[in-house]
Amino acid sequence: MCGINGIYAYHRAASAPNARELLATREHMVARGPDGCGEWWSRGRRCGLAHRRLSILDLSDRALQPMVAGEAGHVVVFNGEIYNYPELRATLEADGVRFETSSDTEVLLQLYARHGRAMLEHLRGMYAFAIWDERRRGLFLARDPYGIKPLYTADDGWSFRFASQVKALVAGQAVSSEPEPAAIVGFYLFGHVPEPFTLYRQIRALPAGHWQWVDEAGPGEPQPFARLSEVLAHGALSPQSPEALPTALRMAARASVGAHLLADVEVGLFLSSGIDSGALLGLMRDAGQDRIRAVTLEFGEFAGSAEDEAPLAREVARHYGAQHIVRRVGAEEFREDLPRIFAAMDQPSIDGINTWFVAKAAREAGLKVALSGLGGDELLAGYPSFSDLPHWRRRFGAVAQIPFLGCALRVLGSRVFPARARSQPKALAMLEYASSLPGAYLLRRGLFMPHELPALVGEEMTRAGLRRLRPLQRLAGQLDPDPLTMTGRICVLESSNYMRNQLLRDADWAGMAHSLEIRVPLVDWQLVRALAPHMAHLTAQSGKQALARAPMNGLPEAARLRPKSGFGVPSAAWMMAGDGVSAAMNKGLVSRQWSRHVLRQAL
């Protein structure tokens, strides 16, 4: 896990890259890689690559980056982990390749030398990397299929820049800071900035599951090599019986957890009271990890309530013989950390506070790697959206399909019932959006609705942002090709939006702020391929109970039967206390105040 960046002056008339800019960008990411750093320049100094290292595999200096391949002369900067690199290495060695390190970085270089961009078909892991191709005199970039690891790019028509963080590119002081209307509108719609947009017009995220080539002709368009909708559509063509799910999930989850334990340092776990992280703990034990340290957050405000994760987490830790670390967090620490949270938050998000504190606790315990149960709800239909969206479409879809009727009824309702329009804006928008799955998803996940935006950001910004973002069309495009099952469609929407743009992004910035690598075994390309034929029959009950029983010693009954609750933090109560807001204020209003505060800090 690292921070990577680079500059390539591809246009012949462009000035050579500035070394101070390259290093300023790199050093902004020092928390991502406190264990080492490096830089490399091409012949003629038209391309510079830089790296900050968090050493996880091959802790020696031999594995420092940028890394140069012996014969081909290719150079790589890489952020992430390739979990199947031992198998890939063995295959390459059988073909006569000799290695100088025991790192996965060197395997990437040798794979590229032999397969070019087809190398991506062989990788299992989370990754974002850039390879300078010495023979072709160009730059090859790629990002993993789920988008677990970030990669941001900027092109001014003369030079191409990339980095692991948006703020790192800005720190180089050569990228325009002109704001992106689609990002601002997208944040108020969803609580995060939708990819590929960032807060700045000139900076874009390389989309998940895409590669990009840059040479003297300039940057090519990002090209897809992996699409979740395609995987699920292919699996739906070979549906399996409901009875086959437990065995398929057990085998695939065990394999994923085993792969994600690959490290030359200790691997810990974020443990809540939920099924996902509890099952991971049992599967870690099955994979042969003897010493397991599990970290749980505890809040005084939740004591004695259903939101208190600690008591049941203690029981699960005892069940599997794990060393349990319970870290209490309070309002005073929240207020003290808030400036650092905003400084670390690379893109605005209404979430991530929980991940900040559990990552902080893990690092305090000396961990450099921790597994997280993130992704279980998206994969196993655990969210209410999997039942709500089909229900809304059945109930309101026919009426909502009548042109302009839904909008007219919303406007009329807001005039007749102004108080309800303010307190329940989604209820009045139901007939406007429930005719399509993307519209229903916007209702389910929306922080604000489109008609509320002018009051927040102004008419002009709203028009420009919606025109550039095209939220409903963007959501619909994620369902091409059609996953063929309703569960598969919602899986794609949740994985491509809430999970990728919020949960995974929060895990990256919050974990890296504490120099902690967060691994997500339930966000795994091989795992979703194995479960794709089971999507048609998957329900929250069947999926989660199968996961609870996936370890050889299944979860205790109290954990299996506990009603679902989020991995929460009492930030609303802390905000009320800190801002002197009436305790009677509802959480929705606090959330709206918080969203404005977050965006002000980001801008």
Image (tube, rainbow, N blue to C red):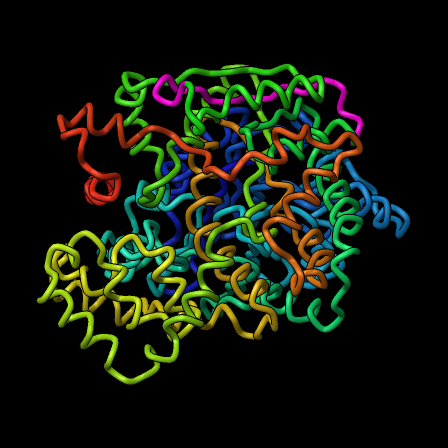
Residue 414 visible, this orientation: yes
| Residue at the spot 35% in from the left edge and 81% down from the top edge | 401
Locate the N terminus and report the quarter of the image it occupies. Answer: top right
Position of 493 compared to 203: left or right?
A: right
- Residue 537 place in picture, x, y as percent: 67, 61
Up-down: is 79 above or below 367?
below
Highlighted range, magenta:
287-303
Viewer-nearest residue: 121 or 349? 349
Quadrant of the rendered structure where residue 425 is? bottom left
Residue 66 lies in the magenta-colored region:
no
Residue extending farthest right: 94
- Residue 310 place in picture, x, y as percent: 51, 20
Position of 368 compared to 99: left or right?
A: left
Up-down: is 108 above or below 29?
below
- Residue 134 place in picture, x, y as percent: 62, 56
| Residue at the spot 85% in from the left edge and 44% down from the top edge | 90
Locate the C terminus and report the quarter of the image it occupies. Answer: top left
| Residue at the spot 36% in from the left edge and 62% down from the top edge | 442
Viewer-nearest residue: 61 or 516? 516
Viewer-nearest residue: 382 or 185? 382
- Residue 301 place in picture, x, y as percent: 34, 21
